[in-house]
Image (cartoon, rainbow, N blue to C red):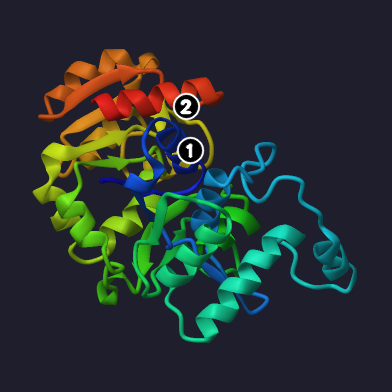
Amino acid sequence: MLVALAGGVGAAKLLKGLAAVHDPADIMAVVNTGDDLVLHGLHISPDIDSVTYALAGLDNAATGWGVVNESWTVAENLRAIGGVTWFQLGDRDLATHLYRTQRLSEGATLSEVTAELAAARGVATRLIPMSDDPVRTRVTLADPGEGAPAEVAFQDYFVRLGHDVAVASLRFEGADRARAAPGVLDAIASAERVVCCPSNPVVSIGPILAVPRVLDALVARRASVVAVSPIVAGAALKGPADRLLRELGYESSALGVARLYAPWAATFVIDEADAALAPAIEELEMRCVVTGTVMSDPAATDALARAVLAA
């Protein structure tokens, strides 16, 4: 089995490629839930949904999030009556959150609901949250402004504030009490290969590692772990990963990410633009693979997936 650690859009793209060149039923994606939130009384799991929609061929390539051919009737009417609309939910996307919330209220676990939604969308890859227990990424702002809270929920930082504010620190609320979702630790222990997708190291991969025993499981399988850098030529292709790394005291480069991953990943995949960093990465006792990592089209995505499988 191939196990993948997955965040949002970058992970969704690579998983789509992996499912195209490898038996999708032989892949398990362990997905970050630190971004989850409750809004309008609905449980929303942005990273799980991004991965599900991508593997189902329903992802919106224009926005990078949500569902293709979306409509916005509910959001428009909510705005007209003065409701909360900073986090927009399209009509097709809304159906997912309604189903998830209902099933959770009936006593189903997040793992069970995620499997049901994936099956309903025709997704063969096994998708599983990192934990069925609530873990929430909390962001401390460096300069929140007069009267504003210093600490906010991740989606407040990412969407409401447009991730355009400096960050002083992060914490993963509830991680110390969480348990890895059923099957996660066994899958890591028995996997032929573990792939860390090109996701934000601190807010997508970080929460997964914060779940007790997950990091230990990865360290024990270090020789079989392949990680893909989300940073190319010092910048993130999408999102605030580069700025977050700098603000939290890390180097915003493929080498900086390699230093974070070196204790638990033996192989690191970087873009051709960063080939000069390969010797320094190999000094970390990591095998460095240089290839094209920018998934600009399906052919490039599939080529990266093949390179990861061959690494």
Above or below for 297 versus 63: above
Quarter holding the C terminus is top left
- Badge 1: residue crowd in 10 Å (few <14, some 14–19, many ≥20): many
- 240 relative position to 209: left or right: right
Is residue 143 visible in the rendered structure shown here? no
Q: Amino acid at mark 2?
A: Thr
Residue at the disc numbered 2: 301
- Tell whether label 2 touches label 1 (CB within 8 Å): yes
Indicate the secondary structure of the residue bearing disc 2. helix
- 218 relative position to 136: left or right: left
Residue at x 50%, y 51% (from the top left corner) = 123
Which disc, if any, is residue 131? none
State the image coordinates of residue 297 (x, y, percent, origin top left). Answer: 56, 24
**Farthest bottom residue in view:** 106
Residue at the disc numbered 1: 16
How many numbered tags mark residues here?
2
State the image coordinates of residue 292 (x, y, percent, origin top left). Answer: 40, 18
**Farthest right residue in view:** 80
Give the distance between the C-alpha atoms of the residues marked 1 and 2, in whole angstroms.
Answer: 8 Å
Above or below for 72 versus 22: below
Residue at x 54%, y 63% (from the top left corner) = 117
Residue at x 83%, y 70% (from the top left corner) = 78
User: N-terminal of the two: label 1 or label 2?
Assistant: 1
- 32 relative position to 95: left or right: left
State the image coordinates of residue 242 (x, y, percent, origin top left). Answer: 44, 37
- Badge 2: residue crowd in 10 Å (few <14, some 14–19, many ≥20): many
Residue at x 36%, y 64% (from the top left corner) = 171
State the image coordinates of residue 10 (x, y, percent, origin top left). Answer: 47, 39
Q: Amino acid at mark 1?
A: Lys
Indicate the secondary structure of the residue bearing disc 1. helix
- 260 relative position to 297: left or right: left
Residue 109: name its quadrant.
Answer: bottom left
